[in-house]
Image: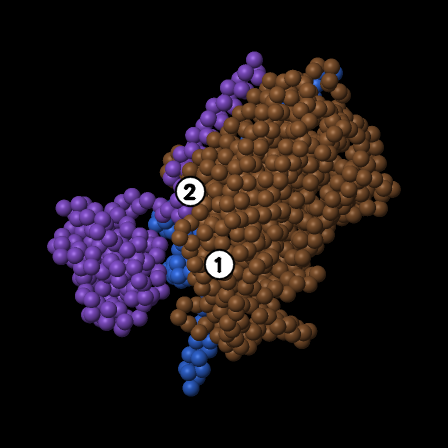
Chain colours: A purple, B blue, C brown
Amino acid sequence: MKNKILIILLVFFLSFCFFVLFKSLESSGIYVPEKTENRELTEFVSKDLFSKKKITSSEIFQGSDYYILNIWATWCAPCRKEHPQLMELSKNSSIKLIGLNYRDDSKKAKKFLNKLGNPFSVNITDQNGTISIELGGYGIPETFLINKDKKIIKTFIGNLNNESVRQINLIVK
Amino acid sequence: MKLLKIFFVLIVILNFFSIAFAEKNDQLTNKISKNLRCLICQGQSIYDSQSDFAVSMKVLINKKIEQGLNEKEIYEFLKDKYGEWIVYDTAFNKNTFILWGLPVLLFFLGGAIIFKKLVFRKV
Amino acid sequence: MLANHIGYYSLVMGLATSILIFLLSLKSYKFKIIDKRIFSISFLQLFFVLISFTSLVICFVISDFSNETVFNNSHTNKPIFYKISGTWGNHEGSLLLWLLVLTLFLFLFLITSKKESKRYRILTLIFQQVIIIGFFLFVLVTSNPFNYLFPEPIEGLGLNPILQDPALAIHPPILYVGYVGSSLIFSATLAAVIENYISKDWAKNIKIWVLVSWIFLTIGIMVGSIWAYYELGWGGFWFWDPVENVSLMPWLCLTALLHCLLVLEKRELLKSWTIILSIATFTLSMCGTFLVRSGILNSVHTFANDPSRGIFILCFLFFLIIISLIIFFLFNKEKQKDYKKIYFFSKEVSILVNNWFLMYFLSVVLIGTLYPIFLEVLIDHKISVGPPFYNKLIIPFLIFFLIFMSLGPNLKWIRETNIKHKFQLIIFFFISLLISFLIYKKIGQTNLINTVLVSASLYLFIVTIRDFFSKELYNFSKKISHFGFSLLILSILLNGILSSEVIMNLKVGEKFTFKNEKIFFKSLENNKKENYQSIVGYFTVEDNKKNISQFKPELRIYDQPLVITSEADIKTTLFKDKFLVMNTIKGNEYFNVRYQIKPFMIWIWISTLLLAIGGCLNLYNRLYEK
């Protein structure tokens, strides 16, 4: 009798393990960042890229229904790729675009924006990379879609493409 | 003249304090960064890694320590942004009590079975 | 190109042969007449796999990029030694190595087990063939090393330069002998259960295979740790990384199994333990293969892989588990009249206690490795399980384990009556407590748990040394292994407690002082080497006795693929290692310099070697006895 209970328990346990391991194969990825479910933005202080004046996050995130914060740098090749998408997004009046220039030479950054166009209404700089971490960013390029309650509703890791622009436009409607 | 001397001595003392604090802060920064996972590296701690992410993280930790946060608060701050995964030291909460408890439970269970089999053997 | 085809068809022939052997041996078992052809066909099976493996090596050596595996993992600029070792440094090639060891061990088993019962040998063969056929199918269906690329690429994609290291080149083959050796133990155990052959004689014969597996696994793990220490550049040697854990778990099982066989040989007890441990060892090896190759794990070691391979291994693994459990429950009968009297103070019980603790350590490692996977699937929540978890759960129990390990082997078989006369042991215990306390006083730390831990390991150390001076001349292998183990724990502990390090940003010409030593960044040298660009930093370290040593940590910039590695310069003496490594800081003339003083590092390697030597001695004794 005891043996039978043991066997039944074992069968259940093994099936459970098999099921879990099988499912884990489906979702396996080498590196997947944690899903941000409406994470609230914490306050931070930054410097304006052009004027070098101090500016706080509460000053930046006001006056719009949606905000897009894009982490970029002149030394980052994929950032160049997503520039057209950013220019397109800047035409959407319900989104305010903020550019966070990451570990970059501000002169080079200014030149870049002057040459290719500046999609951002606000340009701030993050020389030591700490602001990116305050935002919960992983690397560059990275884009955050934030709503008017200052909640991060979507994160795009890697450069934006047409698909991401489509997703953004869907949400922002 | 005397005022200048006092002023000078004060500055030196203040410097010593700040160096002492800086060292202590450094120690705490090291301790915390050893316990944090570098999220863009494969299997390295923030302390060990030289990636952009890790270097920025170390600066940030220093800043937070200077702002007066203690170790636990800094972990909470980072967990809020990146999830529990970033901290190596596994927390003991409702998600992980099985993780911590199961081996110990098995140990005592195993011990009980062995003990029973030894003491109550039918010869 | 020819080698490519030969390799592939050889594999197919191998599969055909293995199915043939399987069917023939089934027939032999059923009709109780051994088909003599089985032995020669087993050799043929081994021969085909050997040809296949050699063909792959040839493909690598001649840089035949029409072979997809070679294309993915090699490059014409790679030195010849690493071209050869690149054969097994990838998923497909390593599976071919698995097959080679599987078939080799089977063949060796057939020729060395002639004295044992025919039915037992045939059954072992049957089970082993099931495993072999499974692997043949796995290779041919999902991981073919001989995929043909057309048109032939001019150049390969190269191998990760971190993997171009002598230690890492020999690490997989050694480990695989350990893992795969346990397959034979698995098959033989299942066969023995069915044939009711779990006995003294069986234990004596199977012990040789367990020893071989165990020795190779021990050395394999050691080589892996040495590589991590010398190559990965941050001075550690064990990170509780899932892939490391995966090699440790079968090792724990094998160690427990080794001790169970002792009891089985002497008193025909612990039969169920032995059976379960044999099954568990191979199951854990397979489980490890699954975890490492399926892409589930996030680690610096893993092969980049696709989940379909994972599904195959998973199903195969569970298939084997179910079969072994069915056999265990159907055939394992403990007869009532088999019960023997067991006294508390006896060597059998101390081995039982040993197993109890080893199984606890195994469960800690197993649960720590698998739990994050389970949690993520069930509630989509990612947690980290790292060194703090393992240290906290292992250390308290390790203290008791060390004490039991000091006392246990001193007990006699069946019954220990001399308890009152073991004064010496008690005195040693207090001596070790005292020494440990003094050590801690000296370094100015007072941590109760660590003090007790060090004293427990000192105790084991002293007791195992004392054992060398006792009159018994037999069991010398045990004394060496146990001494090696105590030295291992002691050196790991002392190294952990007494190590110190400093991290500084320096540029050329700067110096700093650390613990009575002056470190000076003298100069920088750029060089172009065979397949990388080298930047060497010249440092001098002057200690308080005015002795100067020169350190040359190096940065290597490889171009195929683009990777920067940091090679530490390590000065090793018997008493300590000095470890200097430098890293670039982006866009800066400053370098991030990390200097570590690590006492007793070399004793960690020496003691692991001693562990293995003890095993080799035991093996030699048994083979010689035969």
On whether disc 2 and disc 1 are found on a single subunit, the reply is yes
Percent coordinates x, y for residue C588 in the rendering: 42, 72
x and y, in percent, of residue B6 in the image: 44, 79
Residue with the most extreme top position = A1
Please report the residue visible at 29 percent of the width from the left and 59 percent of the height from the top.
A78
* Front residue of C551 and C471: C551
Three-letter amino acid code at disc 2? Asp
Give the percent coordinates (x, y) of residue C1: 49, 50
Give the vertical position of C537 relative to C233 (above or below).
below
Letter of the chain that mark 1 sits on in the rendering: C
Q: Amino acid at mark 1?
A: His
Which residue ends up furthest to the bottom in the rendered image? B1
Which of the 4 image quarters holds residue A2?
top right
Q: From the viewer's perspective, is residue C118 above or below residue C468?
A: above
Which residue matches tag 1?
C75
Residue in the picture at 63% in, 47% down: C174
Residue at left offset 85%, top offset 42%: C473
Residue picked out by circle 2: C306
* Residue at disc 2, secondary structure: loop
Q: Is residue C440 visible?
A: no
Residue name at image x 50 percent, y 72 percent: C528
Residue B36's place in the image compared with C12, above or below, is below
The quadrant holding residue C585 is bottom left
